[in-house]
Amino acid sequence: MAQVTSEKYEAILDRHQEAGRDHLIPLLQELQDMEGYVSREAVLAIGQHLKLPASKIYGVATFYNQFRFQPQGKYHFMVCRGTACHVKGSDKVLDMLVKQLGIGPGETTRDRLFSLQVVACMGACGLSPVVNLNGEFYAKATPAKVASIIHECREKESVHAAG
Amino acid sequence: MVNIEVNKRKVEAKEGETLLTALRREGIHVPTLCHVDGLTPTGACRLCAVEVEGAPALVPSCSFPVSEGMKIQTHSARALEARRTIVQLLLSNHPDDCLYCIRNGGCDLQQLAQELGVRQRLFSGKRSVGKLDVSSPSIVRDPDKCILCGKCVRVCEEVQGVAAIDFARRGSQATVATAFDTGLNLSSCINCGQCIIACPTGALAEQSHIDRVMRAIRDPEKTVVVQHAPAVSVTIAEEFGLKRGIDANGSMVTALRRLGFDRVFDTSFTADLTIMEEASELVQRIQTGGVLPMLTSCSPGWIKFVEQFYPDFVPNLSTCKSPQQMLGALAKSYWAEQEGVDPANVFSVSIMPCVAKKFEMGRPEHGHDGQADIDAVLTTRELARMIKTAGLSLEDLPAGKADSPLGERTTAGKIFGATGGVMEAAVRTAHYLITGEDLPDLKIQPLRGTQGIKEAAVEIAGIRVGVAVASGLGNARQLIEQIRNGRQDLHFIEIMTCPGGCVAGGGQPLNTDQDMVKARLQALYSIDRDETVRTSHANTEVARLYEVFLGEPLSHKSHELLHTHYTKREVLI
């Protein structure tokens, strides 16, 4: 792991020649855009490039909500926990997702089907509480609604599997 | 000179220094939980906050510079109240299991709560529940007890240049973590345990081997042999509240016998043996054009450091095992043979100033014939605990002597516990091996002292041998970088992982400070000054070992038992 094969990151790293630690966050963002999450390999490659220890990079990356450390699932849920959504009961919606999926925010199920993310505000307060599934907004979400969405996803998958 | 007024008393401070430094010099106690001497102040814990006349808020004395005419109250009602509140907030999510905590009685947080008269839980926060990390063979990390002072993080990065841990997440979620929250065993942690020494609470501790040692002692099948490292006898007295800098070798040996160990050997014996092997290896490398500079290999934290950060320097490492491993190997071969004991029934324990030794004993490269060289490692702290549990007091015990044939030591082996000591001992013997004569003056002053890097050039039979010594791996890194960049005048380099050497190891009494380190070093050097046998080649039991068992230094048998190899190591760096 010390000499990571950072070929797949070369194009991005090359854009940050002779970069200092001030390039850390842009690099994390670009590598996350490329892979969908911040992988261990990415952290080690950045570490070599910027001469920073992995623990430091992980420390910075975990400070911000924007970085995730597991690949997104096929079905990616975003739950808004902004003020308006909170007032309208988004905590119960989140609880339901956590319970149904068996994962916490920032995590992905082992079968890589579902992932869960908490965001501060999606700018759709009029629809609160809001849940977003793969870019599609679900307005006035309730635990029951969310449960049926998950159910639909699972149905679709079992049809796929059977077909 | 800057004139300030502290608690209505005139105090002279030095230009540019912090308030805390000035206060400490004056003997005025201001508590802190995050200050580390010599490192950048962070002002994280705020406990050192004092009242400065004219300032709108309390100021943290650890990071506030003195200025002319300053008027300070260190223990005003306001300052005390602030400190009490801080401690109460720190306790709000603390597990409060002091009775069962490894640091019970020796915890800075506990002591502060006591000093400030905290008598009830004022704030009830959500108790922290982290994952106890027992993955490391050396260190146990309990995040629940962590107060996020950051001392471990800074020591790991700024002193040791390792940075295995850092703060992760933020706000109430913040923790000290390794990269990707892996166990310490997968991180770049080198097991030195300087974080344990730095930790003000029970969040960091050694992996204890007390239970397995006691089980072996009670097992009638087992012959339990113990060795003690050179740096232990000069620190263990501190654990019993005795004066610092005392050599308690005799009473410690007696304590070990009373605890039930069947034989007491001295690691300084194999330190002398290490010198015979290592000096011979050096002479051989110089004479045959081997890889130079040769790097010492006694300090297991340093070895792992090289394996993961400087794998290109692995060939420079001496192939000698550390004195601990050498003694273990000999106990289960030479001694067991002589004694007529089955090596499989020998349980080999070492008392070390070090927690990395607990990692070293498990290295697969060590051991032979399916036997590990060492079965358990106890730190100075653990031994003190065992002695207390057994109802013994170091002070009252008569002096005992280590057992033959692995118990004789010279002062050269004893100063292994000090930074520069291995080098000094090696130069003494290398000079003898090459010229057949001892150095006119055995004391090599430039190699002594607490500086991070020390250098000397020694003339041996017309050859100029360049030697250097570094302690603290941040310093070692500097030296190695110089060599990477082409420096060529050095032949032999001694590296000790902990700043000051083994006397300041991660297994030593807690709250080690610079004055203590100096007193401990002084204790070792007094032994070297006062005794007469001061060179490893003059150790008669070592000579006998070669005569009847090993043959000569670097012999086939030596290689089999006393030498090893290292390889590049993959970790999350």
Image: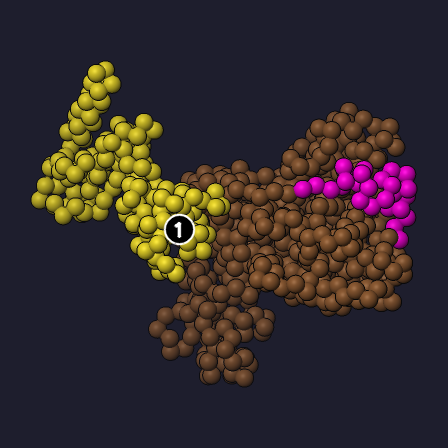
Chain colours: A yellow, B brown
Q: Is residue B558 magenta?
A: yes
**Does B190 sit left or right of B459 as displayed?**
left
Residue B473 appears in which quarter of the rendering?
bottom right
**Does B64 sit left or right of B317 as displayed?**
left
Number of numbered markers = 1
Q: Position of residue B493 (x, y in %)?
A: 69, 58
On the rendered image, what quadrant is the C terminus of chain A found in?
Answer: top left
Observer-nearest of B395 and A120: A120
What residue is rendered at 56% in x and 70% in y? B24
**Does B74 sit left or right of B559 as displayed?**
left
Determine the chain carrying the residue at label 1: A
Above/below status of B192 relative to A90: below
Q: Is residue B258 visible?
A: no
- Is most of the magenta stretch helix, strand or loop? helix
Tag 1 residue: A46
What residue is rendered at 82% in x and 64% in y? B460
Q: Position of residue B364 (x, y in %)?
A: 64, 35
Look at the image and give the residue range highlighted in magenta: B538-565
